[in-house]
Image: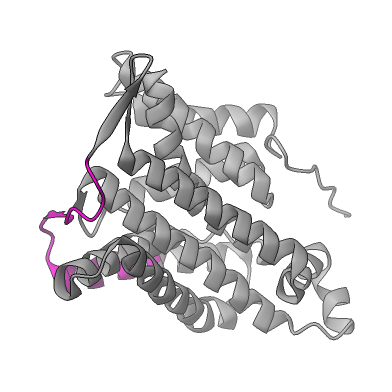
Amino acid sequence: MQQIVNGISLGSIYALIALGYTMVYGIIKLINFAHGDIYMIGAYTGFAVVTYTNLGFFPALIIAMIACSALGVVTEKVAYKPLRSASRIAVLITAIGVSLLMEYVMMFFVTADVRSYPDVLSNASFEIGGVIIKMQQIYILITTVLLMVFLQYIVHRTKVGKAMRAVSIDRDAAELMGIKVDQTISYTFAIGSALAGAAGVLVGIYYNSINPLMGIMPGLKAFVAAVLGGIGSIPGAMIGGMSIGVIENMVSGYGGSLIKDAVVFAILIIVLLVKPSGILGKNTREKV
């Protein structure tokens, strides 16, 4: 039970990052490998806000989300929009290039040193039936659930959300119906990047350390979570993130800490072999 509780906290963070992957893929069929680095920049933004302005957790979270949202939109406009009609491989290589650019530009400005995150949340904990639950874990879970509920509201109850769903189903038909496709894609990047920024602040608080390369592994694991849940499905990203977090902690807790990453990527291989569409994904047929 202790490992499950820890896994839910970690899985919440994976789920927030996975939502960005799945939203962007659902709209323009792009796997944005720079998404993990936007999460890293969110962690540093929250760190700067807390350290230099002495603001609390929620202001740092909101400012990091706004900064990452703006960064996501700029990245889409500069790096991906000119390649909208290019081949898939060209866009994929560009995404990897953007990822490396963000990592090493950040390293240039903040150095490669690992930084300790300030204590902005209570370190108190309590025990229920032998299971220790930290207040930080409760904050992470509540924040994640609220953000996911807000995202579901945007997608299903607002004009922007309806436009996103229309573009994901049939981009050409959506454009013919008067939907501004480029604007809708920018909104998608903005929302996905904001969620990644929130995840960056949460992981900084949870693990108490950040560095410029911290986005690589969580970004890849969040991608595995998106594939497991069904890439393109928002509820699937949530389920996949939670599942990967729990599995990783169970493996670590039972003596497999050295192979926990290998287990996660083994899951990716198995899912692609057995059910490529994921848990909640839909099989799509391509006409020849």
Residue 277's place in the image compared with 85, above or below, is: above
Quadrant for the C terminus in the image: bottom right
Question: Would residue 18 be counted in the magenta stretch?
Answer: no
- Pick the residue in front: 26 or 157: 157
Q: Nearer the viewer, residue 15 or 185?
A: 15
Residue at screen point 40% across, 38% down: 10
Circle count = 0
137 vs 103, left or right, is: right
Up-down relation of residue 204 to residue 6 (above or below) = below
- Relative depth, front residue between 192 and 109: 192
| Image-quadrant location for residue 70 | bottom left
User: Which stretch appears magenta?
Assistant: 99-123
Q: Is residue 141 left or right of residue 114?
A: right
Q: Residue at x 40, y 41 (%)?
A: 138
In-image side of 87 versus 285 (left or right): left
Spot occupied by residue 258 in the image (x, y as percentages of width and height): 27, 24
Which quadrant holds residue 169? Answer: bottom right
Q: Quadrant location of the N terminus?
A: top left
Residue 93 at least partly seen: no
Colouring rule applied to residues: one colour
Residue positioned 31% across, 67% down in the render: 60
> Residue 116 in magenta?
yes
Report whether residue 136 is seen. Answer: yes
User: Measured from the top left, where is residue 36 in percent x and y?
Assistant: 40, 57
Answer with the quarter of the image where residue 153 lies.
bottom right
| Residue 226 rendering spot, x and y as whole percentages | 58, 45
Q: Position of residue 250 (x, y in %)?
A: 40, 20
The residue positioned 75% from the left and 85% from the top of the image is 180
Relative placement, left or right, of 224 versus 60 is: right
